[in-house]
Image (cartoon, rainbow, N blue to C red):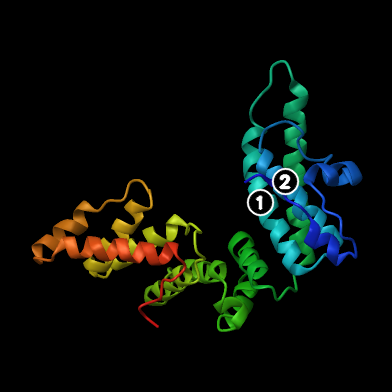
Amino acid sequence: MAFKHITLTFALLLAGCEESFTVEDICVQSPAMCNDLNQDGHCKAQREHTIFYRYLESLQPTDENKYQLLKAFEHYNQCIGLAANIQHIKLKGKTTARRRAYLTSNREMARIYQQTQATTHPGLLYYHWSRNNDETALTRLLALENTPEVKTSAEMQFYLASYYIKVDEQKAIDFLYNTLALNQAKQIPDPEIYTSLISLFYKHHQYKHAYIFAKIAELSGIKNIDILLIEQQLIAQEKNLDSLDALAEQTLHQINQGKFISPRK
């Protein structure tokens, strides 16, 4: 994603300004947003994404903006943490700058977690639980399960599926279906949605369903899908694989068009 060309018209309108900014503009006008991050080519997209949301959060420090910044810093942290271990023989300053950037991302994530201890934002609650093992945050998140904010968010439905897969597998399937139903046209679903459905359906001997999502995963370009065992189960049951192949293609088309409807609704 070309974050360099993201404009901040929306953010600046909130601040009563109608100018459009690029990430480069932010770094010129607000150097503190950029100077403690790496300046070389490593993790460029993640860095620019982080700068964008860092600036947005500085304008409007809402829980939603803190959530987006937390996710941006986490992605940047994962990337720059690896880059910080690459030693430059001639340009040792680059290694030092990456390590400083890694520490910055850790510090900023800690700040956001500290500032949002009392949050009611579903995404932040999920992060407090999944990253920091905060059981109180999980309790608050589960209490929001049936609110419109959570029910209409593909991201939150997927997060809840990741919780329920450990405690209630049928409910996990419901949430995975909901995630696909909320998928917007031309958006690519997280591959883990398909692999989780395959695993759950196979575990519960629902081989037709497992096969359909295995084919969908393959058609989506996901590698290392072990479909052979599922095929063998279906062949032993004398099932028609051609009809299931057609259903898989139809279902994938619905998902890609944003028209998938959960069969459990």
Please state which amino acid type lies under the numbered disc 2.
His
The image position of residue 77, as x and y in percent, is 67, 45
The image position of residue 96, as x and y in percent, is 76, 29
Task: Please name whichever residue, 240 or 204, is drawn nearer the observer in this view of the structure.
Answer: 240
* Residue at 64% across, 74% down: 136
State the image quarter where residue 243 is shown: bottom left
Query: Which residue has dot 1 on it?
Result: 74
Task: Please name whichever residue, 257 or 82, is drawn nearer the observer in this view of the structure.
Answer: 257
Of the numbered discs 1 and 2, the one sitting upstream in the chain is: 2
Q: CA distance from mark 1 to mark 2?
A: 21 Å
Q: How many marks?
A: 2
The image position of residue 179, as x and y in percent, is 48, 69
State the image quarter where residue 23 is shown: top right
What is the crowding at mark 2: few (fewer than 14 residues within 10 Å), some, or many (at least 20)? Answer: few
Give the numbered dot on residue 5: 2
* Residue at 37% across, 80% down: 264
Query: In the rendered image, which quarter contains the C terminus?
Result: bottom left
Badge 1 vs badge 2, beta-carbon distance below 8 Å: no
What is the crowding at mark 1: few (fewer than 14 residues within 10 Å), some, or many (at least 20)? Answer: some
* Residue at 22% across, 66% down: 207
Task: Please name whichever residue, 141 or 52, is drawn nearer the observer in this view of the structure.
Answer: 52
Q: Is residue 79 above or below residue 226?
A: above
Q: Is residue 18 above or below residue 205?
A: above
Q: State which mark lies toward you, 1 or 2.
A: 2
